[in-house]
Image (cartoon, rainbow, N blue to C red):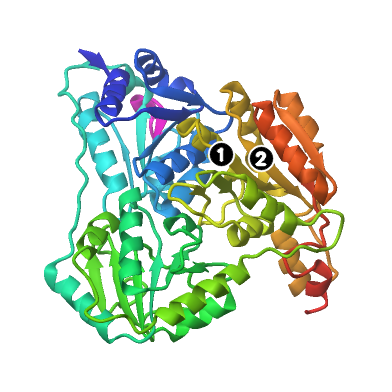
Amino acid sequence: MKTGGQLIVDALVANGVKRVACVPGESYLAVLDALHDTDIDVLVCRQEGGAAMMADCWGRLTGEPGICMVTRGPGATNASAGLHIARQDSIPMILFIGQVQRDAREREAFQEVEYRRAFTEVAKWVAEIDDARRIPEFVTRAFAVATSGRPGPVVLALPEDMLRDAVEAVDAKAYRPVEAHPGPRQMAELAALLEKAERPLVILGGTRWSQESVAGVTAFAERWSLPVSCSFRRQMLFDHLHPNYAGDSGIGINPSLGKEIREADLVLLLGGRYSEMPSSTYSLLQSPYPQQTLVHVYPDPSELGRVYRPDLAICAAPDDFVAALDGLAPKIAPRWAARTAAMHEAYLKWSTPPMTGPGDVQMGPIMAWIEENTPADTIFTNGAGNYATWVHRFHRFRRFATQAAPTSGSMGYGLPAAVAAKRLFPEREVVCFAGDGCFMMHGQEFATAVRYGLPIITVIVNNGIYGTIRMHQEREYPGRVSATDLTNPDFAALAIAYGGHGETVEKTQDFAPAFLRARASGKPAIIEVKLDPEAITPLRTLSDIRGGK
C-alpha cells in the first residue's frame, strides 16, 4: 500500500527524473513528503512562473521533460507564463498542480480552478487524477505526450485527498519515446531535389536535437557545400564560425540572408515550424504556398502542411532524419560552394558589433570582449527586449546546448533559466542577459541562485525604459511618451543585499574588470550596465526612429 504522493514520486523515479523545480503548497504536501526519501534534487523557487521557466530550461537543454510542482489557484496561474513559453517553443515539460479535494470540486472552493478548461490552450494535454491507482498510467502517459511528435508541456492536477489515499497500484514503468523514420523513397527524392537545385539552403530549428544530430547535419552540409541558417533563438544548432553558416533567420534578419532565402530554389526546413518571427511574418516563405521548393522535416504530422504546403514532407525527428542523411552524398561537386562562402562572409560582417554609439557605455566593445573572454561552452540565457539584440546578433554560438531563450518573446525568462542551467551544468559558465524591465519580472529568483550557491553572472542592460515598446511607440506616436519610463533599484546593491556580488558599469572600459571580479567572487553576480536610452538598437537611436530614419 502506497499513498498517492508516494506513487507520484515513484513514477518520477521510474522515468529517470533527477530534478524538480517547485514552490511548495499545502495542496501537495504528500508529494513533498515522498520526495524527502529520494535522491531527486528539489530546487525551491520564489515564484511559480520562475519555477516553470526553470523546468522549461531543463527540457530545452536536455530534451527530457522538465518537472515543475506548484500549488492550486494562484500558484498554477503564476506558472502559466512558463507553460506558454514551453508550448510555443515546443519544450517537453510536466507541471504537477495540487488541486482542491474531490468532494469540494465545482463549488468554487478555496483557490479552485478547473485546469482542463483553463490550460487547454497552453498545454498539449491537461488531466486530473481522481484515482491514486491510476497514477502510474497517467504519469507515464504524461512523459510520452510531452516528448512525442511536437514536444510540449503537460499538466496533471492532483486532488489533495487523492494524494493521501493509500492504495495498491502497479509499479510505474519508464515511457518509451515514439520515433518516426524517413523512408528510402523520401531520401532518394530529397537527393534528386538537391542534385537539380541551383540555390539551395538549409534552415535548422525546433527541438528534439542532440549533440549527435547537430554533428551529423554539419557533416551533411559539408558534403553538399550547403549554406545553413538557424531559426530564431535556435542558434546553438550550428557552429557560427563554420564556413557553411549563413546566419540566423529571425527578428532583425540580415537583409542579405533574407534575400537569399526568398531567392532560393530549394529550402530544406529541418526540425522547426518556421512560425511568424523566424519567417519575418511569413514573408520569407509565403503561406500557404512557398515560391521555393520546400522540403519540410518535422516529427509531428499535424504540423506538416499546417502553415506551408511542402513539396516533400518527411515526418521524422532530427535524430532519425540526420541518421538517414549519412547515406546521402552528391554525385558531382556542388555548384553553389562559392555562394555558400559568400553567405558566410556576409554573416561575419553582419555579426561584427559596432564600436561606437551614444552615451558613455557602448555595448559593441562589451560584446566583443565577452566573445574573447568566455569559454565556447558558456550557456547564454535571456528573456525578451531590445537589449537581447546584442546577444542575438553579435554572440557567435559554437556548441550545442549553450542557448536558452524564449522564441515566444516572454520577458523575465533569462534569470530563472540561468539558475536552472547552472544547477544542471555546475561546471560551465552561465551568463544571463536581461533588460531592467525584463529582470524585474522574475529577478526574485536571484535569491534562489544565492540559496543554492549558483554563481551565475547576470548582465542587466539598464536604460530606464521598456525599450522595445518605446521604440515602437516613437515610431507610431513620435514624441508622445506614455507608460514606458521605469524607475529602478540600484541593481548592484540589490545583488549584495541578496548575498551575491554586485557591480555597476557607467563607462565601457569598466565592464571587463567588473566581469572578471564577478567571476572571481564565486557568487551569483549582477553587473548593471547603464546604457543611454538613445542606444535603442545597435545602429539606430531613439531620435532616429522618432525622426523616421
Q: Is residue 102 magenta?
A: yes
Q: Is there CB contact under 8 Å for labels 2 and 1?
A: yes
Seen from the viewer's position, the closer of residues 145 and 497 is 497
User: Against 88, is 304 above or below?
Assistant: below
At horizontal 15% and vertical 24% (from top left) the residue drawn is: 170
Residue 204 at x, y percent in the picture: 39, 64
Residue tagged by mark 2?
Answer: 458
Residue 534 located left or right of residue 146? right
Range covered by the magenta-colored residues: 96-106
The circle drawn on residue 418 is 1
* Residue at disc 1, secondary structure: helix
* Viewport quadrant of the N terminus: top left
Seen from the viewer's position, the closer of residues 122 and 216 is 216
Residue 337 at x, y percent in the picture: 40, 79
Whole-number angstrom distance, CA of label 2 to CA of label 1 = 8 Å
Q: Residues within 10 Å of mark 1 (few under 14, many from 20)?
A: many
- Farthest-out residue, front: 333
At horizontal 59% and vertical 56% (from top left) the residue drawn is: 395
Q: Amino acid at mark 2?
A: Thr
